[in-house]
Amino acid sequence: MKMNIDFSKIFPLENAPLVQCITNEITCESMANALLYIGAKPIMADDPREFSQLFEKTSALLLNLGHLSEQRQESLLAASSYATRTRKPTVVDLVGYGVSDIRNQIGISLVETHPAVVKGNISEFRHFCGLPSQGRGVDGSMWDQGEDNLNELIDALQEIGGLYPATTFLATGQKDLVVNQKQVIVLNNGVDELDRFTGTGDIVGAIIAALLGEGHGSTEAIAGAVSYFNICGEKAKQLSFGLADFRQQTLNQLSLQMSEKWYEQAKGWKK
């Protein structure tokens, strides 16, 4: 069944949403530039002392578990609380869920605030749902992505979705799953090279947050962000030679594909 999402209305962004990102230092610069490339505004602010004023101005929030510390934990939880009080649409990225008990505890605490979107790779979500997984660290495992395993994960996410009716889950992999209580969408763009430079998932999370800040619904924001980024990767593969060049071309396409009919290349369906 077709997705029935009008991606042609996603870009260009009209309101330049201000997206607050609490994320890891490794990909901070890439995420900030990616937001600028699509017409959004980043602010990489994680000091709770300024949250009371900052949240008066921001459009959306991204909370990324990528590089934990005691200070980062305080920032993530404080920002989540402010977002709940100010009703700011929030994306929680469960980077590395399953690696350690403390990471899991923080992730669950963030999910329990009912963010608009919770994302992670398929292996991270199998850990989250209590399913067996071959994933290690922050990388997803191909062993977790067989058809039976994907269907098992979809069923588990829809069951958990009953506890979080305001949340839509994005599980990324060779096929990307968008799951909530009401529907399941499978997205099928992308190239293998996108798994071979760091920060691709973080960038997708930031783009989702920008689209939420622009006023799009969760399903539309997720499907639009994932499809757009993956199509940029497909175009980059055609133009590049070597992984470093591919990375640069992918980021460059973020500012270019929106002036093309990129949405005609989007592949996906409702289950």
Image (tube, helix red, strand yellow):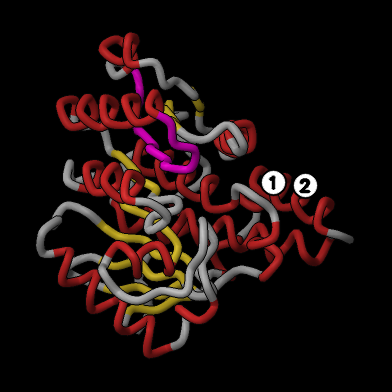
Question: Quarter-wise, where is residue 129 in the image?
Answer: bottom left
**In terms of secondary structure, where does tag 1 sit?**
helix
Q: What residue type is labelled 2?
A: Gln
Residue at (26, 69) in percent of width and height:
130
Residue at (26, 58) in percent of width and height:
168
Assess whether mark 1 and mark 2 are in contact (beta carbons under 8 angstroms).
yes
Residue 58 covered by magenta stretch: yes
Magenta span main SS: loop
Which percent across, then down, holds residue 235?
73, 62
Magenta stretch, residue numbers:
57-69
On screen, 253 above or below 125? above
Q: Which of 43 and 92 is in front in this view?
A: 92
Give the quarter of the figure containing the C terminus.
Answer: bottom left
Residue 208 covered by magenta stretch: no
Q: Nearer the viewer, residue 229 or 95?
A: 95
Residue at (73, 45) in percent of width and height:
252
Residue at the spot of label 1: 251
Residue at the spot of label 2: 248
Which percent across, then down, holds residue 78?
26, 25
Q: Which amino acid does label 1 sit on?
A: Leu
**In terms of secondary structure, where does tag 2 sit?**
helix
Residue at the front extreme, as displayed: 101
160 vs 90, left or right, is: left
